[in-house]
Amino acid sequence: MTNVVSGVATWRAVGLVPDFLYLWMTSWGLSWAVAFPVVLIALPLSRRIVAALVAPPV
């Protein structure tokens, strides 16, 4: 997911320039490095919130 999002964002920001692949991979590395820890923190928190809002199955 981070690969596709960073690719689209890079393409929209700079267009299809000769070093697009390098820019895209650099952007992807940064976005993955940010997204992975955020998911590790947000996932347990969101599961607890959903569990509090939804009744367990019978």
Image: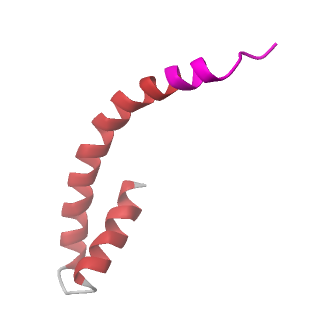
Find out whether residue 52 is within the magenta segment: yes
Residue in the picture at 26% in, 53% down: 31
Q: Quadrant of residue 8?
A: bottom left
- Quarter of the picture holding the C terminus: top right
Span of residues in magenta: 48-58
Left or right of 5, for residue 37: left
Which residue is located at x 57 percent, y 26 percent?
A: 50
Q: Is residue 33 magenta?
A: no
Residue at position x 31%, y 79% in the image:
12
Q: Quadrant of the N terminus?
A: bottom left
Question: Residue 36: x, y in percent?
Answer: 31, 39
Image coords of residue 39 (percent x, y)? 37, 36
Q: Residue furthest top?
A: 58
Q: Nearer the viewer, residue 36 or 43?
A: 43
* Horizontal and vertical percent position of residue 11: 31, 78
Quick check: 21 above or below 5? below
